[in-house]
Amino acid sequence: MEKRVTVEELLEKAKKPAKEAMKLHPFYKGKVQIMPKCAIRNFDDFGIWYTPGVAEPCKDIAKNPEKVFEHTNKGNFVAVMSDGTRVLGLGDIGPLAGLPVMEGKALLFKYLGGVDAFPVMIDTKDPDEFIQAVKWAAPSFGGINLEDISSPKCFYILDRLREELDIPVWHDDQQGTAAITLAGVINGLKIVGKKMDEVLFSIVGTGAANICLIRTLIKAGVPPKNIIAVDSKGILHPNREDIEKLKESNPYKYEIAMTTNGEGRIGGTAEAIKGTDVCIAASKPGPGTIKKEWVAEMNDDAIMFAEANPIPEIWPWEAKEAGIRVFGTGRSDFPNQVNNSLGFPGIFRGTLDVRAKTITDEMHIAAAYAIAEVAEQKGLREDYIVPTMDDWEVFPHEATEVAMKAIEQGVARRKLSRQEIYEMAEEIIRNARESAQMMMKQGFIKIP
């Protein structure tokens, strides 16, 4: 007979990653380092890699700037840049305290996508200063990953940088979360037998993640009237008392208020959730942010993603007891991890491999369908609607679909075949994983 897991055991399991993090971060003193990628046969080789030999590729790049992608690693360098104003569910903890998160992001970039990423913390809260800092640093990188920047300035920063730089700029809290959430929605709806253009969505929280998600859902075929969004002050609708102020302070949220909520609902989170088919929360960490009795008022065969970190808005077992059929969180220690880590490594891999100048909405929607397809091929279940990070084949598949979409949309500098893209991505990702495993086996990375 199967042993029933108690709530106490589940709570203890949920606390374990934090306990281990406090032991292992000081053990390694960081998570990423720089290693050579060129051969160093003897010390004479430094005359090739540095002075005097390096002058020749420098002159070649000066004559033709595109040669920088041939002579340097720019095409695989990504900066993970943040001001530390919206770190996980911890809020404005500043650039120093945010550094462990950016290091972790760089680790995932390398191990899952073969991307050489660098954590770069920017010590300013001024959006224009932040933009200038990114622009100054941009020549070194093939792409920029914005991270953990507070809303609404994150939208302004992303929009400006996408317009003003000729390399892809991506805000993972916006586009990355939207991509993996859309993938979960696609497969969750297959499980419950409902159609995306017919179901009713409740969106709890209207920060960076969900504002971008709403835009993505609409582009993916969800009628705006079928979306009910709620922030800390209540459901967004055209007659809210603060609507004119919102128009000035947060035009992105204002647009949502004016175009969604076809039923004209008013009230708070409980009223927003009631009678909906899909609830996606990216709001205040729980537990208890979303109450069990509210969830019980959703439609039959409902889907819910509670994505707040480090604690979801409601515990999985509470949501299941309330009648949710498909449930996901942002955590790796619960089933159905709806987490950006399945998105950005593959999306950037494909983007970099064709030297795309931007990452369009259509590119991250293509990634969402690729993620969903890999899970479907493995066999969908209520507790398996998106791949896990162990399903490493998702990343080259995703990279291929993103790269093909970039070529189709005319934003790629390189035009390669589908097979060339897939084989390149697979080799780079395989090498990254096997190199890390080899270093552990050989003792260069110590096992705690």
Image (cartoon, rainbow, N blue to C red):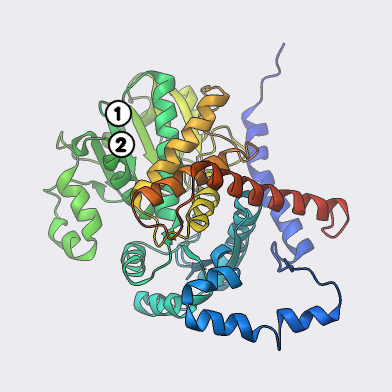
Closer to the camera in the image, 256 or 7? 256
Q: Dot 2 surroundings within 10 Å: few (below 14), some, or many (20 or more)?
A: many
Which residue, given by chain and number where applicable, does mark 2 sit on?
Answer: 202
Q: Which mark is residue 169?
A: none
Dot 1 or dot 2: first in sequence order is 2
Single out the residue that lies furthest toward the bottom: 52
Q: Is residue 344 left or right of residue 206?
A: right
Where 245 falls versus 425 (above or below)?
A: below
Q: Which mark is residue 276?
A: 1
Query: Which amino acid, by three-letter code, is at mark 1?
Result: Thr
* Image x and y of residue 107, in percent: 64, 57
Closer to the camera in the image, 81 or 246? 81
Tell me the residue at 42%/44% (across/down). 179
How far apart marks 1 and 2 lie (CA) works out to 6 Å
Tell me the residue at 36%/74% (across/down). 127
Q: Are marks 1 and 2 in contact (CB under 8 Å)?
A: yes
> Does the image show residue 392?
yes
The picture quadrant where one finds residue 292 is top left
* Image x and y of residue 422, in percent: 56, 43
| Mark 2, secondary structure of its residue | strand
Viewport quadrant of the N terminus = top right
Q: Dot 1 surroundings within 10 Å: few (below 14), some, or many (20 or more)?
A: many
Closer to the camera in the image, 61 or 186? 61
* Image x and y of residue 147, in percent: 48, 62
